[in-house]
Image (cartoon, rainbow, N blue to C red):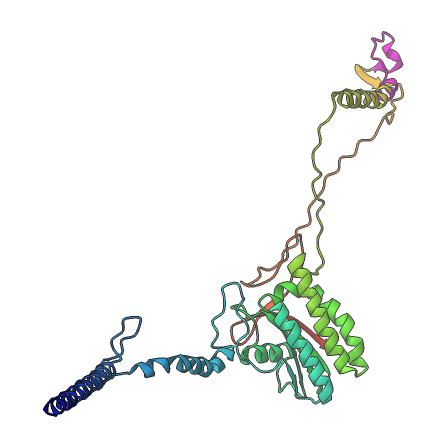
């Protein structure tokens, strides 16, 4: 009986000891887990790049930086769409600065549809050629000459590509039915005086018929052709053509001696003819045939005749010197003897070419 009690008590003590060890292990595990969690969340976040400036950010905050970069790119996208903010590559020419539209119809000669179509054409050609083509219609020149009005409007409104303001403006004034062309920069080279005549020969018939939209479209097409021709070949102009020197070729000795023989034969023919016409000089003892003595003086008694043998004429070229005034810097005189453009200075100090007339 006593032995049974001792066994039960020992069993109870072992069970109690087992529960005690289990509780201690569980408590120790919980404590270790809490301590590890505190250490992890208490440590500062160090970026991969080594920048320790951002301290106190948890790991969760570091994961949120990825969508934040995406948001930043989205916010900066409108700035990239702005043409003035995008840096240009070296192989792209400097485009025209901000200026007025390339079509300004103050005289209200065009319908809205005609304006839209013409403006699209002007923009396409101007951007492709890097050469501004501007159309301007006004009711009055306000006391200015046609060329002065066109030059001033071009300069004051910032037209032109590049440093030299390459481009052209076509002005139409309805007050006195005047037209004017103003050229600037490369325009003075591509659109020579003769080139402008060619353009207006195509444009004037449409202006006189009142077909203004067709006239302006034709002007744009003609300028496009002039610029392309000037860039690929040479400007459309009246040239004082010079013969190109022929390439020297080797001469065969056979032909050389043959030419010398033919030349000697041809030269001997007129010499023999002239020789036959000359008289042989001989001594004549009967001098009284030609002269006689009379009173101690000699008197000619014979007849004297002059016989025409041949005629020799010498000619030489006298060059004609044409003095042309010196052209200012920025003017145009194409190579090959072209007449170029007549240049003048506008009120802003910029050199322009151009022409004007009535329609």
Where's residue 148, x and y in %?
Answer: 60, 78
Residue 170's x, y, as percent?
67, 77
Q: Compared to 302, does 323 lie above or below?
A: below
Q: Quadrant of residue 261?
A: top right
Q: Is residue 290 magenta?
A: yes
Image quarter of the C terminus: bottom right
User: Along the line of sight, which residue is nearer the eye, 206 or 75?
Assistant: 75
**Quadrant in which the N terminus appears:** bottom left
Nearest the camera: 174 or 202? 202
Identify the residue at horizontal 89%, vertical 13% (top origin): 289
Residue at 47% over, 77% down: 85
Total marks drawn? 0
* x 69%, y 34%: residue: 248
What's drawn in magenta, residue-wise?
A: 273-293
Residue 279, horizontal then vertical, whole percent? 86, 16
Name the residue furthest front. 1
Foreground of the two, 98 or 302: 98
């Amino acid at each position: 009986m006593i032995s049974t009690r001792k066994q039960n008590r020992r069993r109870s003590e072992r069970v109690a000891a087992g529960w005690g060890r289990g509780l201690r292990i569980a408590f120790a595990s919980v404590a270790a887990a809490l301590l590890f969690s505190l250490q992890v969340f208490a440590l500062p976040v160090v970026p991969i790049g080594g920048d320790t400036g951002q301290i106190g950010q948890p790991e969760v905050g570091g994961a949120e930086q990825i969508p934040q970069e995406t948001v930043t790119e989205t916010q900066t996208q409108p700035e990239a769409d702005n043409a003035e903010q995008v840096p240009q590559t070296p192989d792209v020419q400097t485009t025209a600065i901000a200026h007025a539209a390339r079509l300004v119809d103050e005289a209200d000669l065009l319908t809205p549809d005609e304006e839209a179509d013409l403006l699209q054409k002007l923009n396409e050609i101007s951007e492709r050629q890097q050469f501004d083509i501007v159309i301007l219609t006004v009711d009055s020149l306000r006391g200015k000459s046609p060329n002065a009005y066109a030059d001033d409007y071009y300069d004051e409104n910032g037209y032109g590509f590049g440093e030299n303001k390459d481009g052209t403006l076509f002005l139409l004034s309805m007050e006195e039915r005047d037209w004017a062309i103003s050229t600037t920069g490369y325009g003075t080279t591509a659109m020579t005086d003769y080139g402008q005549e060619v353009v207006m020969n195509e444009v004037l018939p449409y202006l006189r018929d009142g077909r203004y939209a067709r006239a302006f479209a034709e002007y744009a097409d003609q300028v496009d052709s002039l610029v392309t021709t000037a860039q690929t070949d040479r400007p459309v102009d009246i040239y004082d053509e010079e013969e190109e020197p022929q390439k020297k070729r080797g001469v065969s000795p056979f032909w050389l001696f043959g030419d010398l023989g033919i030349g000697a034969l041809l030269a001997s023919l007129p010499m023999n003819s002239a020789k036959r016409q000359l008289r042989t000089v001989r001594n004549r003892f009967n001098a009284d045939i030609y002269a006689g003595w009379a009173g101690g003086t000699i008197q000619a008694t014979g007849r004297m005749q002059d016989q025409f043998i041949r005629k020799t004429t010498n000619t030489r070229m006298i060059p004609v010197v044409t003095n042309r005034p010196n052209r200012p810097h920025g003017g145009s005189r194409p190579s090959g003897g072209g007449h170029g453009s007549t240049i003048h200075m506008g009120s802003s100090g910029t050199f322009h070419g151009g022409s004007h007339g009535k329609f």
